[in-house]
Amino acid sequence: MGVLENKARARLFYKYLSTVYDRINPFVWNEEMRTAALELLDLESEMTVLDVGCGTGFATAGLLEHVDEVYALDQSEHQLEQAYAKFGKRAPPVHFHRGDAERLPFATDTFDVVWSSGSIEYWPTPILALREFRRVLKPGGQVLVVGPNYPDNFLAQKLADSIMLFYDEYEADRMFKRAGFEDVKHAFMGPSYNPEVAITTIARAPE
């Protein structure tokens, strides 16, 4: 388990990163990647959507180009403070919650879509979180998760494993199917200097 696959350490990490996050983020997760990921979903304006690990609200803003309201959750109070500054803290179109991906504070069968980008790499037990995603999704609902693709180079792999969760499409298949999802598919994306740095997995909850 990598050093940042620990909730307390991840919160401390983002306490400091949150102040510069929006300036750094475009180098690894940019608008073109977000648009490509959004195009993988069947979104309609009235859908109920959850953004898990919303951070400063970059993906939330993209989702709001397609739907009327978004429920957004993050464990980092410092990241959420940055998001509040953009959207407001207590009023639509964003409903913010501070919470844990592995214990979502929502009722079963609530959402049409659960989205998570740049968060799975910090989860100590990814399958537990994915099962929570399935629980809060309506039957047939869509899930989309963007995470870091496992590097090909041996030394890079060792470094990646020491920091956080990196995984390939085969591991993604295993995790999503064990969590009970169906119709699991993957797409690779990234900035021009590394077009496969991210792996995006989409799937559906059983009908």
Image (tube, rainbow, N blue to C red):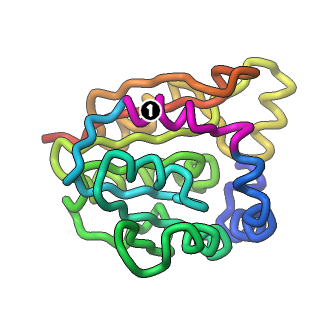
State the image coordinates of residue 99 (x, y, percent, origin top left): 49, 72
145 relative to 18 in the view: left or right? left
Magenta segment, prevailing SS (helix, strand or loop): helix
> Where, by quadrant of the figure, is residue 8 drawn?
bottom right
186 relative to 151 in the view: left or right? left
> Where, by quadrant of the figure, is residue 167 drawn?
top right
State the image coordinates of residue 130 (x, y, percent, origin top left): 41, 49
Number of other residues with Cα within 10 Å of mark 1, as a class: few under 14, some 14 to 19, many 20 or more:
many
- The residue lying toward the viewer, choosing from 80 and 98, is 80
Farthest bottom residue in view: 90
Three-letter amino acid code at the position of disc 1: Thr
Examine the structure image and report whether residue 82 is included in the region drawn in magenta: no
Q: Secondary structure at mark 1?
A: strand
State the image coordinates of residue 63 (x, y, percent, origin top left): 40, 49
Question: In this figure, which residue is indicated by the disc labeled 1?
Answer: 201
Range shown magenta? 26-39
- Going 56% across and 67% down the picture, which residue do you hit? 86
